[in-house]
Image (spheres, helix red, strand yellow):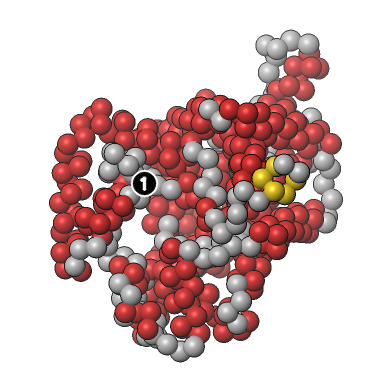
Amino acid sequence: MWKKIGWLGEKLCFGFGVLFALIVVVQATLTACQGGAYAALFFLGLGGMGALTVAGLRFLRPFPAFPIALFSLRFLIALGVILIFGAQPVQDFQTMYEAACQIAKGSREYLQNEYFYNWAYQTGFVAYEAGVIRLFGENLLPLQLLNALWMAGTGCLVYGIAKRFLSETTAMTVSLLYALYPAPYFLAAVLTNQHIATFFYYLGFWLLVRKKKLTFAEGMLAGLSLSVGNVMRPLGVVIVLALLCWAVVRMCRWKGQGVLRAGGLLLAAAVVYFISSEFFSWLVRTSGLNPEGLSNNLPMWKFVLGFNLASGGAWNQGDYNAYYLLPRGQAGPEMAEVVKERISSLGFAGFLELFWKKSQTMWGSLEYLYWGFGHLDGNAGILGGITLSQCLNSLNYFDRGVFVLAFALAAWALAFYFRKGVQDGASLPVMLGFLLCGYYSVHLLIEVQARYRYFLMPVVFLLAGAGAEWLFSWWKSWRANGRAKDKPAVVRMGAAVEENIKNGKPS
């Protein structure tokens, strides 16, 4: 019975993953095709990066300095964006930066701002910014340079995770594709908590999968790393739940002492995560940084926005005026009541419409350029008669091509896993599938913004690497045999996707 439960969990994970990925492909493609002349840049990104993928799989060869080259590439691109364009903190980012400056001076004036009562969990990131400001002063550049370092580190972690279930050549290729994916660089100079949080989350993932046998120390470090990521940006509940689903499926699908031990260590990592999260919250309270610790005192606000059909689940001024600005004791009950009303009034068709709109906003829309470039004059000429706004829009549509390619290849890989399944010791794709499904699903319920997709994109590119590797192997087999019906010898789609992938390159 347990084996059947595990098998069902695996199928549901991959099945819903395919569905979600295909919805994103359709929505993002329709958006890009409505861009008039800019649509050509979309197809350039799609075709150009597709060709680069094939070239990488065909010609890249392992070399020891690749991680250094990858780190340098991503750091230098981010650094270029920071030095050329810069950014000024606005809205929440400005509020947090000003609070960090006050902490660095020993002031607690920021606690008078209702923002730090409602969203006490932001205090962790503010404390990080305050530490940097105390060392280097209030100049924005040190914080922005650290953004570039976190981004470069995440790129290397993508490579490290990819090596655990893809060939060396494919791991190199997919990490290069992620390094050239434009969207994260739009936020390179922005004082957002996404850069540092994403690094620590993927550091936790890497620690969980870097060896065939997880040790107790590595499990504890992984839990601690995930907890630090959660302190910076609170996504941890969704992530840990996805990891626990992965652990349960592993233990149900494959019996044996090794699997049970691995599952037990993953559960231990989750325990360390929750204990350390409580410790960090206690530390914030006792240090006087925030008497509320790292709590969320307006948990219903995200659902108020998320179930607003008219706004498609996005932030809107009407809800802000009507509910967010209510007195402290009144806001929570009023928000809970309006959420109940909106859920009861939707009906089945309404839910489908709402979910489609929210998916469009979250995944199908163009990147929102205001955070990184809103301080600049979009009408300024930079290349002859071409304005800055036109250049940025062109890059945004090119980005959509890379984005759609990654999701399309990920959908292909998930469909393959759904059909073939995975073997014990090669279950990392199950973890990636649960992360994709969990993150996509939770944003069908809460507020959505285009920049929130930042966290999940390394998962998408990792799955895209599996899809690209299988397609490339199939294409080489087809060429060798001259018949499209011939299939490659697919045996271990997991540790190396194909049994005939040897010596670090698809064959």
Left or right of 7, for residue 484: right
Query: Residue 194 placed where, x, y %?
Result: 52, 59
Numbered marks: total: 1
Left or right of 370, for residue 399: right
* Residue farthest to the bottom, as pictured: 106
Query: Residue 433 placed where, x, y %?
Result: 49, 40
Q: Is residue 326 above or below residue 252?
A: below
Q: Quadrant of residue 110?
A: bottom left
Q: Which structural element holds mark 1?
A: loop
Mark 1: amino acid = Ala
Q: Is residue 413 above or below residue 376?
A: above
Camera-nearest residue between 5 and 127 = 127
Name the residue rendered at 60%, 54% in the picture: 377
Camera-nearest residue between 430 and 308 = 308
Asked whether residue 218 appears in the rendered view, the answer is: yes
Camera-nearest residue between 305 and 441 = 305
Name the residue rendered at 84%, 36% in the picture: 59
Name the residue rendered at 66%, 64% in the picture: 149
Query: Residue 349 placed where, x, y %?
Result: 25, 27
Q: Quadrant of residue 321?
A: bottom left
- Residue, disc 1: 314
Q: Is residue 450 above or below residue 81?
A: above
Asked whether residue 295 appears in the rendered view, the answer is: no
Camera-nearest residue between 437 and 167 = 437
Query: Residue 282 placed where, x, y %?
Result: 36, 79
Position of the C terminus, as image quadrant, is top right
- At label 1, counting other C-alpha atoms closer than 10 Å, the crowd grade (few under 14, some 14-19, many 20 or more) is many
Position of the N terminus, as image quadrant, is top left
Left or right of 56, for residue 208: left
